[in-house]
Amino acid sequence: MFRAQGNDVLFDLQVKPDSNRVTIKVKKGIVQLSVTKPPVHNQANREIVKELTDFFASVVDIEKSLPGYRKLIRVKNMTMDEVKARLGMNK
């Protein structure tokens, strides 16, 4: 689910920690990110922020941790169309 809030966009992210490589994809409208770090001592969260910041070329925060390796992500100073275009969802 995507929603605009001021100049920012929030969306749910499904995370797969401890993966062999970093990948980002959208499957059935759900953004999925695989990261190589384990979910221990905030390692995976730091990698999530770094990878998404690089991917969107914008400031990214984890707004909230949700059950089941899900996160609420905030991408700052981007429109919904820009975020979806980076994710390849505007095709």
Image: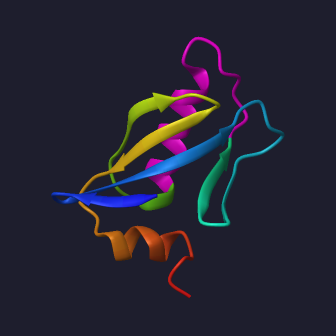
**Within the image, what quadrant is residue 62 found in?**
top left
Q: Check if residue 78 falls in the magenta segment.
A: no
Image location (x, y in percent) of residue 71: 50, 37
Residue at 41% across, 67% down: 83
Image location (x, y in percent) of residue 84: 46, 72
**Total labels drawn:** 0
Q: Is 87 positioned to the left or the right of 38 in the image?
A: left
Q: Residue furthest right?
A: 20
**Secondary structure predominantly adopted by residues drawn in magenta:** helix
Q: Residue furthest bottom?
A: 91
Q: Nearer the viewer, residue 61 or 69?
A: 69
Q: Residue furthest left?
A: 6
Q: In this rendering, is residue 14 above or below 78?
A: above
Q: Is 73 positioned to the left or the right of 51 in the image?
A: left
Q: Check if residue 42 falls in the magenta segment.
A: yes
**Within the image, what quadrant is residue 18 found in?**
top right
Image location (x, y in percent) of residue 49: 47, 39
Residue at 18% across, 60% down: 7
**Which image quarter holds the C terminus?**
bottom right
Q: Residue furthest top?
A: 41
Q: Nearer the viewer, residue 88 or 69?
A: 69
Residue at 60% across, 66% down: 29
Q: How is the image coloured?
A: rainbow
Q: Nearer the viewer, residue 34 or 30?
A: 30
Q: In this rendering, is residue 42 above or below 35?
A: above
Q: In this rendering, is residue 89 above or below 63?
A: below
Q: In this rendering, is residue 36 above or below 79?
A: above
Segment tinted magenta in the rendering: 35-54
Residue at 68% across, 39% down: 35
**Within the image, what quadrant is residue 3 found in?**
bottom left
Image location (x, y in percent) of residue 52: 49, 49
